Amino acid sequence: MMWRRRLRDLALRGASRRLRASVLDASGTAGSSEANAPAAPGDPALPALGPLAVAWREDRAPLDLAARPRQGALGDCWVIASLLAAHEADPSIAARLVDLRADGTARVSLRPDARPHGRRHARPIDVVIDRRMPITAEGHWAYAREEGRGPGWAGLVEKAAALEVAGSYRILAAGFGRFGLGLVTGLPVRSHLILPSAARIDAWTRAGHALVASTHPLSPLVRTLHGPLPLDHVVAVVGADPRTGHVRVRNPWRPDDVLVLDARTFRRGFVSLDLTAVPVRDRTVPTR
């Protein structure tokens, strides 16, 4: 459990910025440690590339703020599923998180000090980054992206979180949905270890709350019409049918697909459900 407590500290306070001690050379390859040296004056810092990327390439495509975020080849479902859930509750969340500036950089507003079960909204921290994004040895975008497109706004949020919260993509690759919801919305988060009824889920999603649910290590033994559930994975919960008990989710691996789970499968396959304490579109959230 020590690593879980450590990760919580990183997610809440961004303490891993102390790890930035290695050097990113001019070719874009990472040094031997997990983080990069501070950037030169005027040059935005870069997080360490992580486990699968080998270099950086600039993303020059226009942002599509209506596109859903999709998880890439990094285990940061706790961030991307939270983004997906917040975007489902209020698509304007993308414009509230990401602001492209005239100099070509982006300002991403995160809230790493958000506390689950807290009573106050977290103040935003603006992270300024450029649009260089990690690519694989084959030249493909490595991590988060807009569904059907390049990294876009989803990749910018992920990069800002890797830099400000974790210090590297590798450390960002594990976490809990409740911390992800706080990070991207700044709202207090409620956690339910006894899974709520479909009627309550339906009421919450209709009201505009963002919801995520987490699977457990034995979830692959639970079969669904869509195949076995993935282990230790976070999905966005987007609705439910009080009459049948069915729950609708979006997997950040395939965010445009809505998966319908019967009540028994949902109870057996998921260990917890987290939701924002107030609707995401609640404008009392502090802005820039």
Image: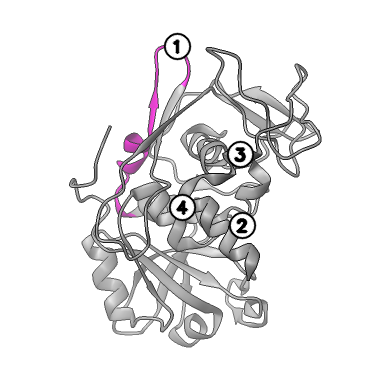
Q: Is residue 51 above or below residue 45?
A: below
Residue 151 lies in magenta, yes or no? no
At label 1, which amino acid type do we have? Asp
CA distance for labels 3 and 4: 14 Å
Which badge, 2 or 1, is on the more N-terminal residue? 1
Give yes or no for contact between labels 1 and 3 (Cβ–Cβ under 8 Å): no
For the residues labelled 2 and 3, the Cα–Cα distance comes to 19 Å
Q: Which mark is residue 18?
A: 3
Which comes before the other along the chain, label 3 or label 4? Answer: 4
- The CA distance from mark 1 to mark 3 is 28 Å
Image height of 201 relative to 78, above or below: below
Mark 2–mark 4 distance (CA, rounded to whole Å): 14 Å
Q: Is residue 189 left or right of residue 255?
A: left
Q: Which residue has dot 2 on it?
A: 174
Residue at x-position 54% and y-position 47%: 70
Image-quadrant location for residue 40: top right
